[in-house]
Image (cartoon, grey):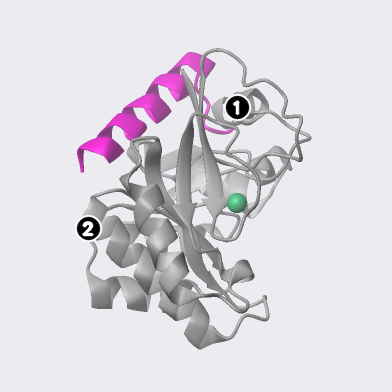
């Protein structure tokens, strides 16, 4: 089975989810419309914290997290490029990370130019749940730093570009530390990402499928 660990959906009507693919739809507080996929991750996205009602957001998160269809928490995280005040970003991120610990569900992380701050949080909060850095497309040295800190990486459409940092990082990522995703890219399917990942890692498509499946099962045991 193919696993798309992090995706968004375009405006309805949604394309049908193909058979044999487990898709995890990322939903954020304030998002309108119903979920399209059978499984979700829920979080407070750093882009969408303007005028947030913290009490309502916390209640919404707790309700959503309690749903069996919610497999992961997030996306949540830190973004140096968006204009949300840093203190609000940190507050939202910490809330999601704490709720992930309480619910014992892994956290999907959105991180833009804030990797050292992210690791400072990890050192400080010492989470037991896995932290998955989604849409990774940074230098393999940054990948190494994150992996050494115990983070997992998820790779998306960036690996389709030759010589991208993402492709380089995926080539050397330990087999049990990565996932694949399409995020908000609707031009490519998760099949495209899997096929390219197999090429980059010099293995068969089946090996990649089994590896990501096993990584996913492991995730749920933590
Ligand atoms: Zn996303």
Pointer 1 or 2: first along the chain: 2
Are discs 1 and 2 less than 8 Å apart at CB?
no
Where in the figure is residue 167, as x and y percent of width and height? Answer: 61, 44
The residue at the point 67 percent across, 20 percent down is 16
Secondary structure of the residue carrying numbered label 2: helix
Task: In the rendered structure, find residue 199 and report the number of the disc placed on it.
Answer: 1
Q: Is mark 1 within 8 Å of ligand 1?
A: no
In this rendering, position of residue 136 left or right of residue 58: right
Distance from the alpha carbon under mark 1 to that under mark 2: 39 Å
Can see residue 127? yes
The residue at the point 47 percent across, 14 percent down is 206
Q: In this view of the protein, which residue sits in the foreground, 158 or 130? A: 130
Where in the figure is residue 146, as x and y percent of width and height? Answer: 40, 62
Q: Is residue 216 above or below residue 208?
A: below
Where in the figure is residue 219, as x and y percent of width and height? Answer: 29, 39
Which residue bears the numbered disc 2? 102
The chief SS type of the magenta part is helix
The residue at the point 30 percent across, 61 percent down is 99
């Amino acid at each position: 089975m193919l696993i798309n660990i992090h995706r968004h959906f375009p405006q309805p009507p949604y394309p049908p989810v193909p058979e044999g693919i487990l898709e995890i739809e990322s939903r954020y507080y304030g998002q309108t419309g119903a979920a399209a996929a059978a499984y979700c991750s829920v979080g407070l996205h750093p882009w969408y914290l303007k005028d947030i009602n913290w009490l309502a957001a916390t209640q919404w998160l707790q309700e959503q997290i309690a749903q069996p269809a919610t497999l992961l928490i997030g996306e949540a995280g830190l973004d140096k490029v968006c204009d949300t005040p840093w203190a609000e970003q940190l507050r939202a991120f910490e809330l999601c990370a704490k709720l992930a610990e309480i619910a014992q569900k892994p956290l999907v992380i959105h991180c833009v130019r804030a990797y050292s701050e992210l690791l400072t949080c990890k050192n400080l909060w010492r989470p037991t749940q896995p932290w998955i850095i989604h849409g990774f497309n940074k230098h393999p040295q940054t990948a190494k730093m994150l992996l050494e800190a115990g983070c997992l990486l998820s790779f998306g459409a960036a690996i389709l570009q030759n010589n991208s940092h993402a492709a380089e990082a995926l080539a050397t990522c330990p087999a049990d530390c990565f996932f694949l995703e399409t995020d908000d890219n609707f031009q490519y399917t998760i099949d495209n990402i899997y096929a390219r990942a197999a090429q980059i890692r010099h293995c068969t498509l089946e090996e990649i499928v089994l590896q990501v499946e096993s990584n996913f099962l492991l995730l749920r045991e933590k």
